[in-house]
Amino acid sequence: MNSRVPAGIGSTPTDVRRLFVVLCGFEILPKSISTRDRGRRFILSEPVCAYLLDTTRGWVLLDAGLNPANGRDVSRMQERFWRHGMTAPVIREMHLLERQLGDLGVSFADIGHVILSHLHYDHCGYLNRFAHARISLQRREHALAFSAQAGPGYFRDEYDDPRLQWDLHDGDWEAMPGLRLLDTRGHTEGHQSALVVLPETGAVILPFDAADLRENWDEEVLPGECCDDAAALGAIRRLKDLEKETDGTTLMFHDPVAIQAMKLAPEGYS
Ligand SMILES: [Zn+2]
């Protein structure tokens, strides 16, 4: 048994062999979108990633990247971004998911399981390539995203696809030994974060949008947009406790500085 497997993750060795950080592009946003009431006049270039896991049960993708059309299709950019005074994402050829998977010798068909943190457009952009796969999500997130209350961060045409095979969960759940999903409701109704256990690295905490930037984490600053502020603060604290308890490494999802120190695919963590 791996001595760094944290309590609560089970007594069996982890089924996850490697983790790849796949950088899918950048969003250009006022900083206050990530840090409540801080930096409204600062424009950040925030990375958007997906995490590819090599497991004994096959390839698993955590989040589904950015739809390239959001940074290339002019009429879509006009309708979804420019019309609202926003800047469209920057997605270059080297950021395309298919290209980076290809460099690893992996095809969309090889990925049988996609787990989504939530359904904001920067987390589910390639779902239309996964009609063959199981798509796991919190039930509350699915309900909200398909309701009239879904806010502007939800691009319904990215996920309202009758071919998709949804696998809906309520609260914490374990996908396999070494891959646990954690209910971190607060940023959205059904946000979930992940705890991955790797053979060499040990515990890796993936907050996704529970804490976009290192500043959210260190100073417990709320995300710009939350459905429940108290829950969002609780989510940050819960993940920080987990980092301490597992002696884990935390990979910030949207931090433009932290991303520069990460190993990016085709390099990976084992
Ligand atoms: Zn979000």
Image (cartoon, rainbow, N blue to C red):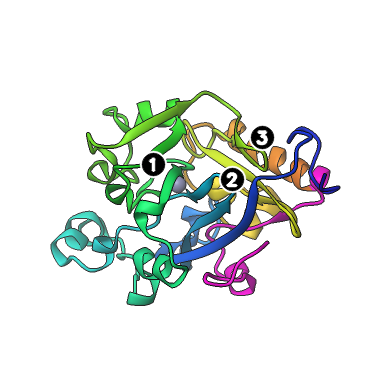
Amino acid bearing label 2: Leu
Q: Position of residue 143 (x, y in %)?
A: 36, 26
Packing grade of label 1 (10 A; few <14, some 14-19, many >=20) is many
Q: Earlier in the sequence, mark 1 or mark 3?
A: 1
In the rendered image, which residue does mark 3 sit on? 234
- Viewer-nearest of discs 1 and 2: 1
Does the magenta-highlighted stretch encompass residue 264?
yes
Amino acid found under the numbered disc labelled 1: Leu
* Region rendered in magenta: 244-270
Position above or below: 35 against 22: above
Q: Nearer the viewer, residue 176 or 216?
A: 176
Q: Residue at x 76, y 52 (%)?
A: 248
Dot 3: element: helix
Which residue type does callout 3 highlight?
Gly
CB-based contact (under 8 Å), mark 1 and mark 3? no
Q: Which mark, residue 119?
A: 1
Mark 2 / mark 3, whichever is N-terminal: 2
**Pointers 1 and 2 in contact (CB under 8 A)?**
no
